[in-house]
Amino acid sequence: MPKKLIPWDSSKYLGTEEDIAAYLKNCAAADDPLTMVIALGNVARARNMSALAREIGMTREGLYKALSPTGNPSFSTISKVANALGYPLAFHVEDAARAHTATSSDVRTLVRSHRQAEVQRKALALIDATVATAAQLRESVLALAGDTIEQPGSARTAANGPSRDPRGAVARRVADDD
């Protein structure tokens, strides 16, 4: 004869406050919101769902639905249920401080890299402006001097005179001592 299986109901085994506290603690350790919702539903059924529903201002059916595996209760509902059951939600400051430290470190790193990128952009803009100014100055000198100064790259460029390298930067040529 086949054995008949019955569905498991945790609420039937939550007879004492110690059992309930240990059950909720273990469910919280799972770090899964759905596990906590189901656990609160099991504790509510163990304690009397109808009385709990009246206490928090919900219908019994609405509370069953909210605390079911397919329910999607609001934070307010979870908070009210936990408070009414005698287990108010609490946030541990030391855990939040560690998370804040990590976040602050990440923000500092992002700000530092943003500042470096901004400094690089400003330096490149300054270099471009300097090169443009030097080119304009050179053109003005050439216009005033006429043909007495040769163009850069020719054999007769004055020693140590201004010239342009292939990348566009202004440089001074050093006369060969050889």
Image (spheres, helix red, strand yellow):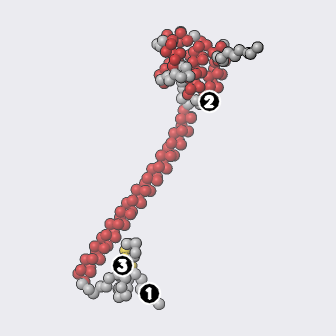
Q: Earlier in the sequence, mark 1 or mark 2?
A: 2
Foreground label between 1 and 2: 2
Foreground label between 1 and 3: 3
- The residue pinned by badge 2 equals 30
Q: In percent of the image, x 51 and y 46: which residue is there?
A: 105
- The residue pinned by badge 3 equals 163
SS assignment at label 1: loop
**Image-quadrant location for residue 91:** top right
- Near mark 3 (Cα within 10 A), the count class, few <14, some 14-19 or many ≥20, is many
Q: CA distance from mark 1 to mark 3?
A: 15 Å
Residue placed furthest toward the bottom: 178
Q: In percent of the image, x 54 and y 32: which residue is there?
A: 93
Q: In percent of the image, x 65 and y 17: which residue is there?
A: 7
- Near mark 2 (Cα within 10 A), the count class, few <14, some 14-19 or many ≥20, is few
Q: Position of residue 13 (x, y in %)?
A: 67, 15
Q: Earlier in the sequence, mark 2 or mark 3?
A: 2
**Image-quadrant location for residue 123:** bottom left
- The residue pinned by badge 1 equals 176
* Lateral position of residue 146 relative to residue 26, left or right: left
- Residue kind at label 1, given as amino acid type: Asp
